[in-house]
Image (cartoon, grey):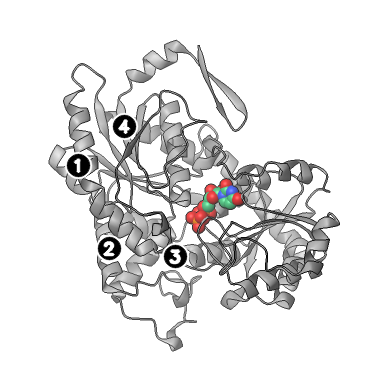
Amino acid sequence: MSSYTNGGVVVVVDEMEKRERSAGGHLVLLPCPLQGHMNPMLHLANLLHSKGFSITIVHTQFKSPNPSGYPSDINFKSIPDGLSKDQEDDLVSLLLNLNLNCEAPVRDFLLQMQSNRSGQEPFLGIIHDASLYFVSAIADDMKLPRFAFKTNNMTFYVGYLLTTQKGCHPIKDEELEEPVFVLPFLKIKDLPEVKSSDLHIQVGKMVDATRTATAVICNTLKQLEQNALPMFQQDLSIPVFLVGPLHKYSISPPTTATDRSCISWLDTQAPSSVIYISFGSLVTISGSELVEMAWGLANSKKNFLWVVRPSSVHNSQWVELLPKEFEELITNGRGRIVKWVPQQEVLAHPAIGGFWTHSGWNSTLESITEGVPMLCSPRFGDQRINARLVSCVWGVGIQIENDGMERGLIEKSIRRVMVDKEGMEMKRRAMDLKEKIEISLNKGGSSYVASEKLKFFIKNG
Ligand code: UDP
């Protein structure tokens, strides 16, 4: 017997199971080195490992994942990427450079791996983040099955299609509030903006790499996106496996900055009394937004757990710009400000009554999976679309419109979600959604069946 620890839980691996696993075949997984992309790929690795496949995760040196917390027979292989530390500041150039710089080292690694494999279990294919379109040329040349993994949802994919059809022309002001014809719960302003011709070309390559894959794996479930599902399937016309929410298969291993003391603080709080605030791993805010957020929280009278990432507030290291009077609230026990939390555990904590989020897809899934209603402050990318799903389709939250970071509006919005009758209705719907998700993950449920079909498809084609 051997063992590994995941989220504090010791998982014992049977040697017999290990031998059976090596008979299952080998898969190479290629994540994109952004937190919101890496986490779901690692959860997918755990899911496929539990289904008997042996797994190698090929990752960049930039933002390399922490292998502790994963089974010891999942291999982690780092490749040179030529990326600099500040690359995350410009996502468009990060994606471009990843696709330019990683093709040669990934190709070399795969060719070498294949030549050393004689007598070993079959190499069944590559699963790559859909944004890493360079993989398609390698898989074609090596005649390997290729699975595009979409870490965001189907509605966003359809949104991208609609945007690219328009070309890279800026959206006119008078169009912004118009509903999107095929998905009327969205407004034109929610669609992802493709401002430059460079980005337009890149998005086109991502869409092509998705369309030409052997199959697509998506971190969503069909119950959440009935509107986009038919358009998604029609555009792709290849097998699609909706296996989400993947974070239910494992807990993300903590990073060095994770502050676990917040869990013991939450243990002292009344049920559903605390609002949790986090804007994910990429969003940055101005100093004045930080101050407005602080006063909105203070005036809402609700207790809070607030994640502020170091350097995420413009022109400051951390929270030095907060007024002294606000810091007194913290000294008096009204709230905690921390740098990074174990978010899945926080959202599952009974003390959490609401989540003020930037509406990243992982955060959205993690929240609905725990039945936590949301206050949404989307900024870019897929976030505006996710916020509309939350507020207009599922009815489990509200959106602060027009990036409204004003203390009075924030106070009112927090009370709408956490105190008012309207908020109680959101909570009820969020609990219904939680139950639907649990059913989909249990034996016979849609995500469970999709993951079984995926296993069969990978093995048998
Ligand atoms: N996260 C976390 N601790 C934090 C804040 C965020 O573990 O303090 C995780 C969160 O659980 C989620 C990911 O970081 O899995 C953020 O992904 P998301 O898609 O929500 O947003 P992004 O960071 O990509 O904008």
Above or below residue 156? Residue 72 is above
Find disc 2 in the rendering and name its residue. 202
Question: Gap in Å between the C-alphas at discs 3 and 1?
Answer: 28 Å
Ligand 1 within 8 Å of disc 4? The answer is: no
Amino acid at circle 1:
Ala
Q: Quadrant of the C terminus?
A: top left
Amino acid at circle 4:
Leu
Residue most toward the left? Answer: 141
Ligand 1 within 8 Å of disc 3? The answer is: yes
Residue visible at 33% across and 51% down? 130
Ligand 1 within 8 Å of disc 2? The answer is: no
Question: Gap in Å between the C-alphas at discs 3 and 4?
Answer: 30 Å
Question: Gap in Å between the C-alphas at discs 4 and 1?
Answer: 13 Å
Q: Tell me which numbered mark, 2 or 3, is placed earlier along the sequence.
A: 2
Q: Tell me which numbered mark, 1 or 2, is placed earlier along the sequence.
A: 1
Residue 74 in view of the camera: yes
Question: Gap in Å between the C-alphas at discs 2 and 3?
Answer: 14 Å
Q: Tell me which numbered mark, 3 or 4, is placed earlier along the sequence.
A: 4
Find disc 4 in the rendering and name its residue. 27
Residue 381 has which mark?
A: 3
Amino acid at circle 3:
Gly
- Image marks 3 and 1: residues in contact by CB distance under 8 Å: no
Question: Gap in Å between the C-alphas at discs 1 and 2?
Answer: 19 Å
Find disc 1 in the rendering and name its residue. 139
Secondary structure, mark 4, is: strand
Mark 2, Cα crowd under 10 Å, few <14 / some 14-19 / many 20+, is some
Mark 4, Cα crowd under 10 Å, few <14 / some 14-19 / many 20+, is many
Residue 157 has which mark?
A: none
Residue most toward the right? Answer: 332
Q: Tell me which numbered mark, 4 or 2, is placed earlier along the sequence.
A: 4
Location of residue 74 by image quarter: top left
On screen, residue 193 versus residue 309, left or right, reads: left
